[in-house]
Image (cartoon, rainbow, N blue to C red):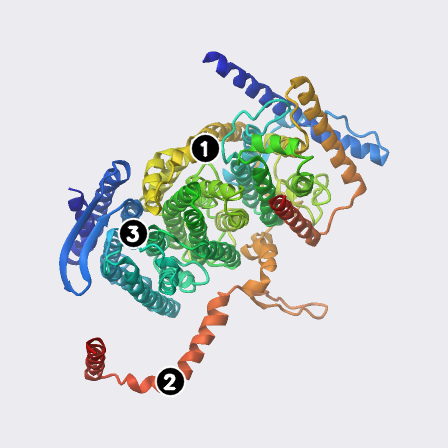
Amino acid sequence: MLQSLYFSALLLSALSGVPGLVRPARGGRMASWMLVGSALCALGLAGSVLYGGLTWQAELRWALPGAHFLFRGDPIGTFILVPATLVPAILSFYAEGYWSDGAHADTAPALRLFFGASVACMVLLCAAANAVLFLFGWEIMAILAFLMVTTSDQDAAVREAGWIYLVASHTGALMLFAGFALLALGTGTGFDLGPLRPGFASTPAGTAAFLLLLGGFLLKAGVGPLHVWLPGAHAAAPSHVSALLSGLMLKMGILGVLRIIALTPDPPLWWAGLLTGLGAASGIMSMAFALGQKDLKRLLAYSSIENVSVIALGLGLALAGKTLALPALVMLGGAGALFHLLNHALLKPLLFMGAGSVMHATGTRDLERLGGLAHPMPRTAFLFLAGAFGICALPPFNGFAGEWLMYLGAFRGTQPNGWVWSVVTLASLAVIGALTVACFTRAYGIVFLGEPRRDLAHPAHESPRSMTATMAVLAGICLFIGLVPAVLAPALQAATRELGPGLPALGSLANLKALSLMALIGLPMGLAVWQAIRRAPSTRTGTWDCGYALPTARIQYTASSFSRMLTDGFRWLLLPIERIPRIQGLFPRESRFQSQAPDTLLDRGLNPAASFVASALSWLRFLQAGHLPIYLLYVVLTLVALFAWTLQ
Amino acid sequence: MIRNLVQPALVLLAQMALTLALAPLLPGIVNKVKALFAGRVGPPVFQLYFDLAKLLRKGAVFSRTTTGVFLAGPAAAVAVPFTAALLIPMGAATAPVSFAGDAVVLAYLFGVARFFVVLSALDTGSAFEGMGAAREVTFAVLAEPALFMGLATLARLAGSPSLAPMLTAAGQGWRAAGGPLALVLTAWVIVFLVENCRIPFDDPNTHLELTMIHEAMVLDHSGPPLAAVLYGASLKLWVLGALVVKLCLPLRGTWWIDWPAFLGGMVLLAAGVGVLESIMARLRMRRVSQALIAAVVSGTFGFLLLLLA
């Protein structure tokens, strides 16, 4: 029964783009409903596995050494499966309006096919219990993502982003190949993903396996400094694809890290330290970059790095708890990380859909040109506000409950006989929280509030209902989870219990119902005051602004000026490129100040390094003759050499 | 069963009524002290009550640029400190609502207020308000960790991440852990002054200077929305003040000592703010972040000192 639900979800999503190839006119709607069917199957699975305590397993033969189709429906995978199918179903309805067959006849059917197939890959990854099968799904997913990122490939920036993504993705995959090969030494079950031998994690092979796997998974997840591919790829893709990449595909990397934690019985303490250090540094760094961005979608992409970093902080707590035998820390850190994963999977697509609506309406995503969109686009503005509020992890929205669990864990860690370094988690969560508020008040305030800044190509207009309605569905789910987070407690608990043995109940550690109580008091109070002051008799006039007689939109604070103080504080990291005009003479000519925040690591570090390596290794080019038979010869020679080596 | 519910309900109502009624007194005390220092008579202590009554009777002027978000700022400014007041023990009472992790809720509630006040400022499209908003979010980045390092210290002292036991343990722990608590107090007083827009970090009495933060954000509010902003500011002063006062006051367990001690502490705190504002000039913008970094460092040292103890 459960197997058939799972395979229906897999097949429905994999084939969702096929009807559109035959009949493009109705393909979009068919694909959406097939994805809804897949999401319903996943919800059914989640009900049985997370709330009912059932598990399932399926095995099929496959004529590859070391590999067979081994699927296992465990709580962690099932927990991630739900957003991985539900959110794409919602996005697919949005895509019907946003990337319609009418406006994009040449790319829409193919994009839909890739979209559905990549959802199927995620479904596969969530239950894959064999390393070869896992890598199979992983690689197809990466290639489909490349194909989707480069949809608008007539644009040079898009092609470049696509290439960087492909290179990064394959670097990660290479690390995973090596990592899984080493992991097989520790499991004793070949390439099936089983628990590691006690003690293996501390051996050199175990250390190498951990570092390689962590590198590969965090590269996919986009935790800094392995994030270099992410901002470009997310900005280049169509918005619903950005939402899929950012909200869900990054989480496949987190799934991998969760699996490592679950499989290792005795992780060394430095693993936790490494994850916490990476999470803290990358979270603060990404927010600094986000504050320097003028491109709305790049800003959202950097915010995704921040969110996966926060998840990494939670996983660091869980790992420390596992090593030090503090079950409360494992439960709070793990449940917090999973909760935050779900929240980000819902909120970031909401924000990307909002950004897509803005682009749809105005044709630009440059913050310095936008402004005052709340008047022409009230529904989009309201829903984007919901997303911005949620992603700042403020109560009573869903983002808060997840971070709150991590805070609780970090506070427990600061107790005697705890993990003192969790104070790093505590402080960095606080800094990241405040930076996020700065970043998203900036994004929302500059785009939607105030006066329109420049004349756009055409006047902004509200997006079609199909686009705003899908955003409203996501916002509604977020609000519901935020108001009653306790409904998720059993699922979080079931999934987190996979991470280690003998974990306490989540309810005994964190009173999620108390959050509902606070929302019950604060929310009506706020709404009541809002209503009361709204009813006062009022007149409308221009903004006073200390008495400017002829205010223009140009004196408004811009995106750059809003974040100037903060980005100045991070100058050493951002290394902004600035063009400061020199003003001379009595009647200076009109001049312009420009500043840009490039991705320091990519533009100043990796790109120069890569060109240096490429030129240094150019003498090896003779191997790459461009003739297929020669490549086949290489394969044969390698095989012969391997045979010779194994037979000796 | 009923009996068990009556007492907490009474405590809740009493504490809420006291907060709502007495909060506007604090700015009055501050201003009176400042006036006395300057050799003036100054406005009556109840001036804010009169101002609020007058503003509520007036009409409001809204900018054509603004949307519904404009009023979310004042609404959050009142609702947030009110909700936060439920989490803080005052006087002899324990907090009406108390659970593990309520300290985090308290901190993030003020994040909600900040979020909406900043958006409310940006909604007018005014350059001044944008400037105030930018400064507000910038200084929060350092104020938050200072608050949380203090919370971590107290949580370790109390063995609980819940405010009521944390503040009780702090009040009673001055003899055993005076050093760490003094450092936390330093950090929190700085956070208290920054969050409430007090000299030396911000000046709530001037409106037009280029160094303004909070007042610059509410330039375009008038009538009842302005009343909400002013009342909300006094509530915030009360709530964060209660946090600082409770940090210093031990709980004796008898209401006729604890309540007067608490209220006396609040009056003293307000008077202290008045004295400070009279004898200090405002810091330059650059120095504000340096003072905040000092607060973070102070809180961190407090935690480290407690680790060694």
| Badge number at residue A618 | 2
When the figure is inspected, residue A298 is found, relative to residue A56, above or below; the finding is below
How crowded is the residue under tag 1: few (<14 C-alpha within 10 Å), some, or many (20+)? many
Three-letter amino acid code at the position of disc 1: Leu
Whichever of labels 3 and 2 marks the residue nearer the N terminus, that label is 3
Q: Position of residue A432 (x, y in %)?
A: 52, 50
- SS for callout 1: helix
Instruction: For the N terminus of chain A, give its image quadrant.
Output: top left
How crowded is the residue under tag 3: few (<14 C-alpha within 10 Å), some, or many (20+)? many
Left or right: where does residue A117 sit relative to residue A588? left
Q: Is residue A447 visible?
A: yes
Q: Position of residue A339 (x, y in %)?
A: 39, 43
Labels 1 & 3 near each other (Cβ < 8 A): no
Which residue position is annotated with label 1? A515
| Badge number at residue A71 | none
Mark 1 vs mark 2: same chain? yes
How crowded is the residue under tag 2: few (<14 C-alpha within 10 Å), some, or many (20+)? few
Mark 3 vs mark 2: same chain? yes
Q: Work out how far the residue at label 3 is from the one at label 2, CA to CA, in angstroms.
A: 44 Å
Which of labels 3 and 2 is toward the front? 2
Q: Residue at x 67, y 45 (%)?
A: A547
Which of labels 1 and 3 is toward the front? 1
